Amino acid sequence: MKGWLPLALGLLAVVVGALWTLQGLGYVNGSVMSGETLWALIGPIVSLAGLVVLWLGLRARRRTPPA
């Protein structure tokens, strides 16, 4: 059960980062972030960090021997 938290947080970060990117690029309207270049830059960074956390979580699950 050690690796489920990084997997969940990593997946959440990837989804949130993708949403922020789309909002920053103006594809998703209805928010203060819509059309703002700052969010188009922050979004991919958050998504990339989420992918790293996902990768680390997957590695932790593979290394942990079954109980």
Image (tube, rainbow, N blue to C red):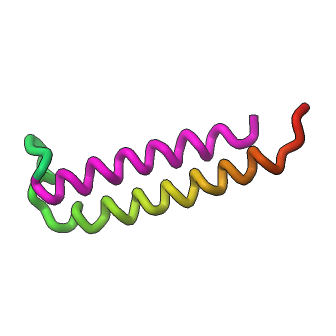
Whole-percent x and y of residue 37?
16, 67
Magenta stretch prevailing secondary structure: helix
Q: Where is the N terminus found, in terms of image quarters? A: top right
Quadrant of the rendered image containing residue 28: top left
Whole-percent x and y of residue 12?
45, 43
With respect to residue 36, does 60 lie above or below?
above
Q: Magenta span covers which residues?
A: 1-26
Whole-percent x and y of residue 34?
11, 52
Number of marks in picture:
0
Q: Residue at x 12, y 50 (%)?
A: 27
> Residue 62 vs residue 49: left or right?
right
Whole-percent x and y of residue 60?
75, 50
Most extreme residue toward the front, as rendered?
62
> Residue 23 vs residue 41: left or right?
left
> Residue 61 vs residue 29: left or right?
right
Residue 67 within the segment the image draws in magenta? no
With respect to residue 4, does 53 lie above or below?
below
> Residue 61 vs residue 64: left or right?
left
Q: Residue at x 59, y 43 (%)?
A: 7
Residue 9 within the segment the image draws in magenta? yes
Q: Residue at x 40, y 59 (%)?
A: 46
Q: Residue at x 52, y 48 (%)?
A: 10
Quadrant of the rendered image containing residue 2: top right
Q: Where is the C terminus found, in terms of image quarters? A: top right
